[in-house]
Every structure is written in C-alpha cells, then in structure tokens.
Amino acid sequence: MDLVTKKALQKSACKIRMGVIEGTYNAKSGHPGGSLSISDLMAYLYFAKLHIDPNSPDMEDRDRLVLSKGHCAPALYSALSLRGFFSLDELKSLRHIGSMLQGHPCINIPGVDMSSGSLGQGISAACGMALAGKLDDADYKVYAVLGDGEIEEGQVWEAAMFASHYKLDNLVAIVDYNGLQIDGTLSEVCSPEPIPEKFEAFGWHVITMDAHDFDSIENAFNEAESVVGMPVAIIQKSVKGKGVSFMENQVGWHGKAPNKDQYEQAMAELQAQLKELED
Amino acid sequence: MAEEIKKATRDSYGEALRDLAEKYPDLVVLDADLAAATKTGTFKKAHPERFFDCGIAEANMMGVAAGLAACGKIPFASTFAMFAAGRAYEIVRNSIGYPHLNVKIGATHAGISVGEDGATHQCNEDIALMRTIPGMTIINPADDVEAKAAVEAAIQMDGPVYLRFGRLAAPVFNDVANYKFELGKGITIREGSDLTIVATGLMVSESIKAAELLSAEGINVRVLNIHTIKPLDTKLICRAAKETGLLVTVEEHSIIGGLGSAVTEAVCDCCPVPVVRIGVNDEYGHSGPAVELLKEFGLCAEAIAEKVKKALELKK
C-alpha cells in the first residue's frame, strides 16, 4: 500500500475511534473495546474497499456488510457518518430515545444492510445475501464481521457449512480475534480455538491478518479476491480497545462507557495520534 | 352428503409453490432436510435451481431467508412447525421480524395431528409464539383451496408471514364458486344466532360438522373460519359476540396463546361475552394415529358439539 493511502486510512481509523468514544460516552453505555478493535477494518472497508454510495445507500449492486458482532455498532456508525451516510452529530445521540442510532445495528439506518446484534445470526443473513448475489449473477461481495466469542454460537457453524456447500466465494467473513469476551479470555470462558483450523475444516479458505496494519489488511483482502469456489474467512488478530491506552487488552472495557475523565483522556490520546498523522 | 375429498394442506403448499414459481420469478424455497415431508420437494422437482436445502440447521435457514429477502428475493423457509416457530423463534424474531423482511415461513406438521411421531414433533405452541412478534402475519388455512390461496396472498404482501400447514388429510370444503381469500378477513361459513364457533385450520371442518349435529337438536350455530390469526378480523368477531352473546373457539393448538387467546383479547376490548376455548389443554401430546388422537383430545365434531351444549349454559 502506498504511504499516502496508508496515512489516509490511519487517519480515518483514528477518527472512527474518536466517534466510538464520543458515542459511548454520550450514551453512558455501549461497547468500546470491540469497536476499537475493528476500527482499522472499518476504515479499510468503508474508505478503500466497499463499492458503496452514501448518496444512494440502497444501490442494488452495492457491496453488503453485516456487522454480525452487532454490539460494535459504534464503530460501524462512526465509519458510516464519516463516509457521509449521515451527519457526524448523530453519533452523540447513540442509544438515546428518539435516535436513529439504536444500540445495535438496525436496517433502517442509511448504510446498514442488516439488523444484527443477537450473536451468531448476522453470518446467516450474509449467506443469504451472497446466495442472492449468485442467483442474480451480481458482482457484489458480502462481508460479515464476527466476534471471536461470537463464534461459540452454533448457528455460526450451521452458516459455515451452508456457505461452503453452496460455494459462496462472494462471501468474506472477518473474525475479530481479540481473545477477550465478556466473562474473560476465550480460553477461560469456553474456547472456540483453534479458529483457523475450524473454518478450514468447514471448507473455507482461511487468511490471517494483523488487524492494525493496513499492509496486512490489504494483502488479506487481495488474497480473498483471488479465491474461487469457496467462502473466505479472514481471522484478524486484534487488540481489544486498540488506540486507547487504558482500554487495550482489558476485559472490563467490553461493555462499559468511559466516564468524563476517561473520555477526556481517551480523546486526548486519539487527538495526539491524529495530530501525529497529520504532521 | 357427497363423498368427502381429503387432502393435507402440506400437499397444497408444495403444489402452490410449484405452480406459482413461474408467475413470481423472485420466489425461492429453502428447506431443512424435510422436503419430502413438508412437500417443498414438489417445488424442488419442478424448479431445482430455485430450491436450497439448508440441512438440519433451522436457525441458519431462517437467517439465510432473511438475507435473501434483504436482496429482493421472496424466500419460503420450510420445516416442521416445531422447528420453525420453536427452535428458530429467536432468529425469526430478530433476523426476520425486527427488520420486517419479506420472508414467508412455511411451517408444516403443526398440532397433534402429526400423530405417531409424538410430543416432540407435535407443535401446539407455534401460533402463540408467532403472535408475539410485531408485524408478523399468521395464516392457518383450513383446506386445500384455502392453503393455495394463502400461499399466493403471502407472496403478494410485503413482510413476514407464518403459514401453518398440517400433515393429516383434511376435508376440502372451500371448493365453491364464491370462495374468496382475503388476508385478515374471516369467513362466515354458516349464520346462526345462539352462539358462534370461531374456528381455524383443521378444526373448521370439524366445527361445521358440529354445527350440523347441533342444528339437528335445534341449536342455531354461527361458524366463522378465521384463517388469518394475525391481523385478526376483530370486526367480524366482535359482531358475532354482540349478535350471538357467546363464543366458542376451536383450534388444533394450545388453548394458551392461540386463536382462543386472540379472540378473548379482542372481545375484551369490544364486547365482553363468555368465550369457551377448545384446543389442546396445557399438556403435551403423545404418539398415536392422528384421527384417534384428535378424538382423544376432544378435537372432533362430536366432542365440540358436546362442549358447545355445555357452553350454552353460560348464556342462561
């Protein structure tokens, strides 16, 4: 990836993270940890990869994205607002009464392709979208973003079987492998590991990538493009809470909003990162 | 009476899908390894390229249906009622109901008339479960004619629909020239003034027979066929409550949460009269031949007539 593109994406990711902090702080609830771990992915998809048009969110041949780990809606909303699907101001209304921005993604929001949040379900909807694309001989791709804890849901593996059986090579599932879930580490709770081997066993082409390195991200998605006849799983090794020092790798920041002091510190850190990128 | 023609509504379902495929090019059919039983196999045989077996994985099938609908397809997702409404309830609620996607759920083998398979496969709770989902349309057709009409009506409306079909061959009685299926509109099969039987599905034909038995005893029974349980034809039901002063609901479903509950809730709001609910009581079914089970559970004309006579005492 050229340096200009990389820097632009890094800036976008930083702004997405600021939106995550802004949203969850104003909501006094929400899930910053996992939202921060997928912020670079969201930046890459929404600013470099997806065939979408903010002025025509329902465009028929658009790429689809299903945030199966729907609790990380703050990162999705932040990316959508930065990409122009709706005003940045909306982020402050996250989870408020009367707000368009529900606690979990809702299909009525411009740019949101599927309601999600009950874990394990988004990947099935993504399979249906990919199948529809095959039936229509359409060019669009379908991306599903899953949590590593989420794949403990049996439905994920029902969907995994389905996707390989129907050779859905227009489907890419990205598993956010940050190693932490609500009750602790994956290995403490009820481990779904080894993750790559499981997807391979289910007939998927598996790629691993560093979730916070845009060269690695781009290589992974380029490889995904070249796969024919089978669905692709990208396992992204990530840091939960990435970008905010005191949230990184902390189970406690799965579903907790920052207080005023924490908000200010987080925003200061992100501002500093942004400034460094802009210099 | 002329010889009765009988046909299971699941057969009607499969045939309707097959016959409507050409008219509705977006129609696709999903099943969960039960195509031979749900009769979607009839569609599969005629249109294999539009049939997708999801294997024994009902949760995923409902999600796949949601994704197909989100991309403009009209998917029919089929399995037994037990798994469609029971096992996959939360997926139906969150992936189909909440986004209000255009998915049609074709649930067969509803009620105790599943027969020999017994309690694990006899779903008496599906209407109750589906009624709780906002925006879900629920259709429980009574015979072959109505089942076929219901499938097309479901295709023509935008939004999620739960269609309930049976395994047991049911008498065909709607094969009359003036039959008209209107979504959300009940049908007055027979006028009467002493009381109203409000029936749905397989129990409509039994209720008509019960009304004939009662007629011979001088009891004048109105019979309503409520094929659409949600949205409910409250106008027709409330008028029956006002005009006849007593309702008896009959359904092959639990007396909790189904037609009986829906009717009771409706008359509470418009015209509170006694409502006697006939259905499966708060218990599980068990194995046995379907017709014998229906008799045992009081879901046959004779038992309905007896209960109606007892119910009439509430009017005194």
Image (cartoon, coloured by chain):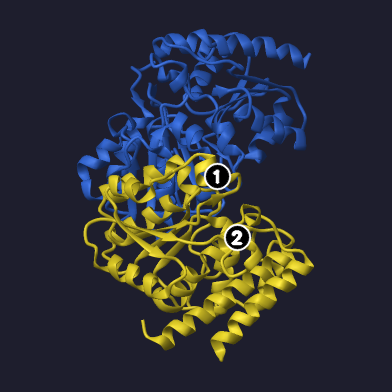
Chain colours: A yellow, B blue
Q: Is residue A66 above or below residue A225?
A: above
Q: For residue B125, what is the image quadrant?
A: top right
Q: Provide the chain ID for the residue under circle 2.
A: A
Residue B84 percent location from the top left of the image: 45, 35
Q: Are marks 1 and 2 on the same chain?
A: no
Mark 2 residue element: helix
Kindly identify the amino acid type of the residue bearing the numbered disc 1: Arg
Which label is found at residue B93? 1
Residue B162 percent location from the top left of the image: 48, 40
Frontmost residue, B83 versus B42? B83
Residue B30 percent location from the top left of the image: 34, 43
Which label is found at residue A190? none
**Placement of the N terminus of chain A among the 4 image quadrants:** bottom left
For the point 74% across and 22% down, the residue is B274
Task: Name the residue tied to disc 2.
Answer: A33
Left or right position of B197 against A206: right
Outermost residue on the bottom side: it is: A279
